[in-house]
Amino acid sequence: MTPPSPEERALAAQVARALAEDRWDRDRTTRALFDRPVRAEAVVTAQAEGVLSGMAAAAATARALGLTVGTAARDGRRVRPGTVVLRLRGDARTILGAERTLLNFLMHASGVASATRRAVAGARTAPRPLEVWATRKTLPGLRDLEKAAVVHGGGRPHRRDLSEGILIKNNHLAFVPLADAVRRARACAPPGERVQVEVRSVREALDAARAGADALLIDNATPARARGIVRALVRAGLRRGRWVELSGGITPERVGRYRSVGADAVSLGALTHSARALPFHLTLRPARLRRPAS
């Protein structure tokens, strides 16, 4: 038997924490109404239009409690009201205990994926390719779920944590001069890795580029201001070969306003920290008796 991968172990631990949080095995209502096992089947359906995500967590929740997973839709597919995404079989008491945890995973992840799809649609007609990235502004404990949901929605996960990539921000530069900071970062970066600097003005962008930063994060700029910074880089001969990312206050609905800036990517914290949940519903019924094969 193949041992579980690190990702599978992490998912199992996340599911266990979520089930324990809801005290699935101490459901007083179910205990009062059922004194013995009841064979049942459940159907999970979408209640709104959007993009599906969170199926791995939902299925892992069911399997962790010994439920049989039948139909399981694929992450990234479009759903609409009534779309069946999951079928389960098992003891009704167990299904009721798993219901809220399972639906919470689906609702939140699908909300993130749906928001990402809207942002990607807004970037689609940019004169140059404009990627949509997530950020580290995730809900505690749900980062991997949310980053995966961004991918299901057509976006890019960006760096997962502080160990991935180098980004010099204003709080770093309060202690280390810009040129020295870039030099130190470059000395520690593997060959080919970008050293990125956060900037907010034309002067900061030009200084960072001249210091050797090969990626810039234009933070909290209006479309007009960001466009001015990029054009200044072009005039100075510092745009070619340099990655430009936009971030700060950009929502899925506002991505379209940044299409003509000339950047390479927009990163949106709103994809993960503010995505509206996509509703799903679980319907439970007595299991149908299956006829033995003749």
Image: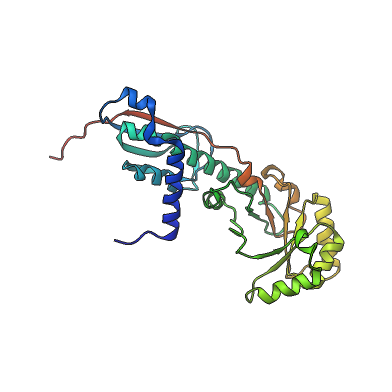
Residue 102, by quadrant, is top left
Who's the residue at 86% across and 67% down the image?
235
Report x, y in % for residue 74: 44, 47
Who's the residue at 50% across and 32% down the image?
47
Q: Is residue 238 visible?
A: no
Left or right for 47, reference 282: right
Q: How has the structure been colored for display? A: rainbow
Vertical comparison of 181 with 270: above or below: below
Q: Is residue 76 visible?
A: yes
Vertical comparison of 145 with 179: above or below: above
Front one among 113 and 293: 113
Residue 172, by quadrant, is bottom right
Who's the residue at 67% across and 59% down the image?
129
Number of numbered labels in the structure image: 0
Front one among 28 and 66: 28
Report x, y in % for residue 182: 75, 71
| Residue that lies at the very extreme toward the top in this rendered image | 33
Report x, y in % for residue 27: 39, 30
